[in-house]
Amino acid sequence: MSRPLSRVVIVGSSLAGLQAAESLRAAAYAGHITMVGEERHAPYDRPPLSKQLLSGSWDPGRTRLRPGDAIDGLGLDWRLGLAAVALDPERRQVRLADGSVEDYDAVVIATGTTPRQVPNPLRLSGIHTLRTLDDAVALRTALDAEPRVVVVGGGFIGAEVAAEARRRSLPVTMVEALPVPLSRGLGSRLGQMCADLHVAQGVHLRCGVGVSGFEGDGRLERVALSDGSVIPADLAVVGIGSEPATAWLESSGLTIADGVVCDPFCRASRPGVYAAGDVARWRNPLFDEVVRIEHWTNAREQAAAAIATLLADHGLGPEPAPYAPVPYVWSDQYGRRIQVAGRTVGAEEVTVVHHEPDNGSTLALYRFGARLGGVAGINASRRLLPFRTMIAARVGWDQALAAAAA
Ligand SMILES: Cc1cc2nc3c(=O)[nH]c(=O)nc-3n(C[C@H](O)[C@H](O)[C@H](O)COP(=O)(O)OP(=O)(O)OC[C@H]3O[C@@H](n4cnc5c(N)ncnc54)[C@H](O)[C@@H]3O)c2cc1C
């Protein structure tokens, strides 16, 4: 017989955590839900942090994920500004930083990621990362002082910061260890198109080189590169990826391997423990590939899937389906929307099926074996969406090319 469900603890009060709470209430679960969040803010959205908030077109309040009355309507027991520091799956308890303990029948881990850092042994000011609302407000204030900017890392967040700094006409150098920025997400061909766009907008691009250190007297004055060159700078933004926030789970006995390892139903390795969002790793049956996905859409979809499993495990819902999403991410740079669906890394063939030189609208398909595995577009939303559906339907490469030609 399944265990009764009267206490759920959600750790991580952001996108996946809020979705988990909303899915529980939508399924008419009326029991107790404790929401534990390290940040003191009500749940807010991260994509605008590197876009509308950084540009100043939105104030911080506009990033809130739900209005106050919708949040109140969920009837949650909030523990904000308090980190979870340990999980005991035997006793079914979460311990918080103030020493208090939360008992649970089921716990959802939705603690996301924390940014990787470049060592800053001199503790210089002027070196930023961008993950939280507080980070974004601090970075916006720093940009207002019109600094010379170095962006370390040419991924989506670094590229969005570079675009905003250029919109402000600030001098910007982007340093990327790979030969082509954005190539991790887009592959080298579309990555190069985006690189050309950054260069055309005045970004100094330094590829194939890393940062060896930050120099200055109290404040950042120079960024030293691994090839011996030095870039004068007042502000560095480090966007070199992130690590799953699992340090607090060290003593839990859960299987952790670059994230909380889950089965295809979002169950972690001990009974009563589920995980979703940026922190969760599992084998995606759609591609038979072990992944951890750091995208907005996945955080919501996976949290909903985790709750479906949680309810089923307690006899409160139908048998869940394995979680088999088509990953999807977007990024906005210089007024262009970049979108990727499916997978691109390791593609055996990339075919550009649409390109309009005048406005840069571009669509590329990514082949894995005989199947369409991914699609990426620049200003091509309408064209991209049908391919997203085709990836979910596991269509063959030839069929995808035929659809593109039509
Ligand atoms: C600047 C920025 C821009 C982005 N832009 C895009 C975009 O354009 N498109 C896109 O698809 N994706 C984008 N993303 C990614 C997207 O926002 C994330 O995939 C999404 O936020 C993941 O949600 P999550 O709930 O899993 O994790 P998070 O949003 O990281 O939330 C995790 C929460 O858990 C809290 N937490 C961590 N440890 C503990 C602990 N021990 N105890 C209690 N609480 C804890 C954290 O403080 C945080 O509030 C962006 C991300 C950033 C940072």
Image: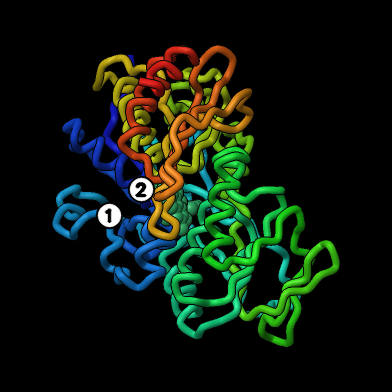
Q: Does the residue labelled 2 lie within 8 Å of ligand 1?
A: yes
Instruction: Locate the C terminus and report the quarter of the image it occupies.
Output: top left
Q: Nearer the viewer, residue 36 or 159?
A: 159
Residue 268's x, y, as percent?
50, 29
Decide: is 177 above or below 6.
Answer: below
Other-residue count near label 2 (Cα within 10 Å), few / some / many at <14 / 14–19 / ≥20: many
Residue depicted at x 32% and y 33%:
304
Q: Mark 2 points at which residue?
A: 15
Residue depicted at x 75% and y 58%:
210
Marks 2 and 1, how far apart at CA: 8 Å
Q: Where residue 65 is drawn, which disc sits there?
A: 1
Q: What amino acid is found at the position of numbered circle 2 in the picture?
A: Leu
Residue 352's x, y, as percent?
51, 32
Q: Which of 137 and 368 is in front in this view?
A: 368
Residue 130's x, y, as percent?
51, 63
Residue depicted at x 53% and y 27%:
366
Decide: is 236 above or below 319.
Answer: below
Q: What amino acid is found at the position of numbered circle 1 in the picture?
A: Leu
Mark 2–mark 1 CB contact (< 8 Å): yes
Label tally: 2
Residue most extreme to the right: 228
